């Protein structure tokens, strides 16, 4: 049974859906089936910029080093973590009261108290803190401690998903308050209350952890855990096959190469993860509404799912997956090459001698960047450029690192990814709000649509579900009229893992499929097989 991209409110039931098939390990090594059962090495594609929750690390939970007040279980239901119970919410939706677990200590032995919670949230909201996700806490007016074991949050307006934002890790005031929040040693050598303690971080190479013997939830059976940072998909597959890794995330076509042997299993996780092409507002071609609309129907999404993802995903028409309860029915875009050509003809983009369209001396051409070594992005970029050329638009694909790509995002298109489980506000606000254009990787296309801005604000400032549905329907319909991004696919995440432990499963996953996601989301609960 194969899981597909997130099914909206059905996410809770789908989160535990896991596709398991036999897979191979032809040359087991130190991390292979014969390795110590109390250690694990997994391959991930990306590493974070920082390990500080004050700067956004672990905001969706599962940060290994830290615990939040709450956590998500395997079915994406909220459960207590550093809090002893779910919050008490006032009738007006403006006050959330959390009772804290007693006897919890940070990994340096110092006690965890309500003051650490207050420090964490107030620091994140401080203007001097470089947290790119702080708008997700825009509703927070104040947070205060009542004694050592109670925290009260007061909101400016009812924010329906506030409790889901309290899964982010809590930082120790006695450590982090004594240094620069943006550049101090805590950003790379953190101390938390989580099930694991960081023992080393070699950037671009690996992150190493050891079990926290004093964790309030009990000491993990997997005593040593290593995340190898391997950006190239092919290299990751090769190292997995050689036995250097116990598990790894792989593109579907590479995961298929591990189907011959029962010593490994493949897990497919449902996700909110999408691939999209940014169409920069400041580019005279990509910023033209007619070009955007034409590309939106020239692209053959279904073929991308079938050929690139080998069926492990769904066509994407926006950040909201089509089976989600938040999806606006009727905003699906058909593949219509003739329609795309008609849009361009009517807008004055006429075919030139080489078939590429021209208007007022401007050639319909622009570059499209994708991340080096990322096979899925490369394949999406090449397919998109091929579809665009059939409509008379010349898109030149180029590979680069984020250091090369980021300075070019204002004017050049990027094969980007995104997606956050749970509430539609989490992803759409950062992706589409005009005031966030140019703010790092938020609103990469610098999309500017007043109707979308109004709807995004309306959607986050009420807890009335019908009003919120209407707001996010407006966002999606506006994206169909003027798509500042061409959404391509929602992709499932595929992992191959050695069959040496019990307790592996997957959650519904965000775009960020690194430390927090994968079958190792709950590595602290794994048990060696007898």
Image: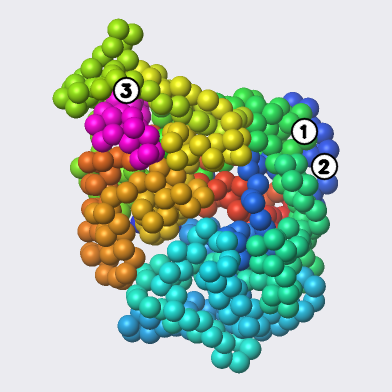
Mark closer to the chain start, 1 or 3? 1
For disc 1, the marked residue is 243
- Residue at the (72%, 64%) spot, across then down: 184
Task: Tell me if residue 41 can be seen.
Answer: no
Q: In the structure shown, which secondary structural element does the residue marked by tag 3 occupy?
A: strand
Q: In the structure shown, which secondary structural element does the residue marked by tag 1 occupy?
A: loop
In this rendered view, identify the residue nearer to me: 210 or 501. 210
Q: Position of residue 52 (x, y in %)?
A: 65, 62
For disc 3, the marked residue is 362
Mark closer to the chain start, 3 or 2? 2
- Residue at the (77%, 33%) spot, across then down: 243
In this rendered view, identify the residue nearer to me: 171 or 123. 123
Q: Quadrant of residue 183?
A: bottom right
Label annotation for residue 35: 2
- Residue at the (80%, 53%) spot, across then down: 200
Q: Position of residue 350 (x, y in %)?
A: 23, 17
Which portion, as a residue range, is magenta? Answer: 280-303
Q: CA distance from mark 3 to mark 2?
A: 61 Å
302 is within the stretch colored magenta: yes
Q: Position of residue 322 (x, y in %)?
A: 32, 44
For discs 1 and 3, the disc positioned in front in the rendered view: 3
Q: Position of residue 222 (x, y in %)?
A: 76, 55
Q: CA distance from mark 2 to mark 1?
A: 9 Å
């Amino acid at each position: 049974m194969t899981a597909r991209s997130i099914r909206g409110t059905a996410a809770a039931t789908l989160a535990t859906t896991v596709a398991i098939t036999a897979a191979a390990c032809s040359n087991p090594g130190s991390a292979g089936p014969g390795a110590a059962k109390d250690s694990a090495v997994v391959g991930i594609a990306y590493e974070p910029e920082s390990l500080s929750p004050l700067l956004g690390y672990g905001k969706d939970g599962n940060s290994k080093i830290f615990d939040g007040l709450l956590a998500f279980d395997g079915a994406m239901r909220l459960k207590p973590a550093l809090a002893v119970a779910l919050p008490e919410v006032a009738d007006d939706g403006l006050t959330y009261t959390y009772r804290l677990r007693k006897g919890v200590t940070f990994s340096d032995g110092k006690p965890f108290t309500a003051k650490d919670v207050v420090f964490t949230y107030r620091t994140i909201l401080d203007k001097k803190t470089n947290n790119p996700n702080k708008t997700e806490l825009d509703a927070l007016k104040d947070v205060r401690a009542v004694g050592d074991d109670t925290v009260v949050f007061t909101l400016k307006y009812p924010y329906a998903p506030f409790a889901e934002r309290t899964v982010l890790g809590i930082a120790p005031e006695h450590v982090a308050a004594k240094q620069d929040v943006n550049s101090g040693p805590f950003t790379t050598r953190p101390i938390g209350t989580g099930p694991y303690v960081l023992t080393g971080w070699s950037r671009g190479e690996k992150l190493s952890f050891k079990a926290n013997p004093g964790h309030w939830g009990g000491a993990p059976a997997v005593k040593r855990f290593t995340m190898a940072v391997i950006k190239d998909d092919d290299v990751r597959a090769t190292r997995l096959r050689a036995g250097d890794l116990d598990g790894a995330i792989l593109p579907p076509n590479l995961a298929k190469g591990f189907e011959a042997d029962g010593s490994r299993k493949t897990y497919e996780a449902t996700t909110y993860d999408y691939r999209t092409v940014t169409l920069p507002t400041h580019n005279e071609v990509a910023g033209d509404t007619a070009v955007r609309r034409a590309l939106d129907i020239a692209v053959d999404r279904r073929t991308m799912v079938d050929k690139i993802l080998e069926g492990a995903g769904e066509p994407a028409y926006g950040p909201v997956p089509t089976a989600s309860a938040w999806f606006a029915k009727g905003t699906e875009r058909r593949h219509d090459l003739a329609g795309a050509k008609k849009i361009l003809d009517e807008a004055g983009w006429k075919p030139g001698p080489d078939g590429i369209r021209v208007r007022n001396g401007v050639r319909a051409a622009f570059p499209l960047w994708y991340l080096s070594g990322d096979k899925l992005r490369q394949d999406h970029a090449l397919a998109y450029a091929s579809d665009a050329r059939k409509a008379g638009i010349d898109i030149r694909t180029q590979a680069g690192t984020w250091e090369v790509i980021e300075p070019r995002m204002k004017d050049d298109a990027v094969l980007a990814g995104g997606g956050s489980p749970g509430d539609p506000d989490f992803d759409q606000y950062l992706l589409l709000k005009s005031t966030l254009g140019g703010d790092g990787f938020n609103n990469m296309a610098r999309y500017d649509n007043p109707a979308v801005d109004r709807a995004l604000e309306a959607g986050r400032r009420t807890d009335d579900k019908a009003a919120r549905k209407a707001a996010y329907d407006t966002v999606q319909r506006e994206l169909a009229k003027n798509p500042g991004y061409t959404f391509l696919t929602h992709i499932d995440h595929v992992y191959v893992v050695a069959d040496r432990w019990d307790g592996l499963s997957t959650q519904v996953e965000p775009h960020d499929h690194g430390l927090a996601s994968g079958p190792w989301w709950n590595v602290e609960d794994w048990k060696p097989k007898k």
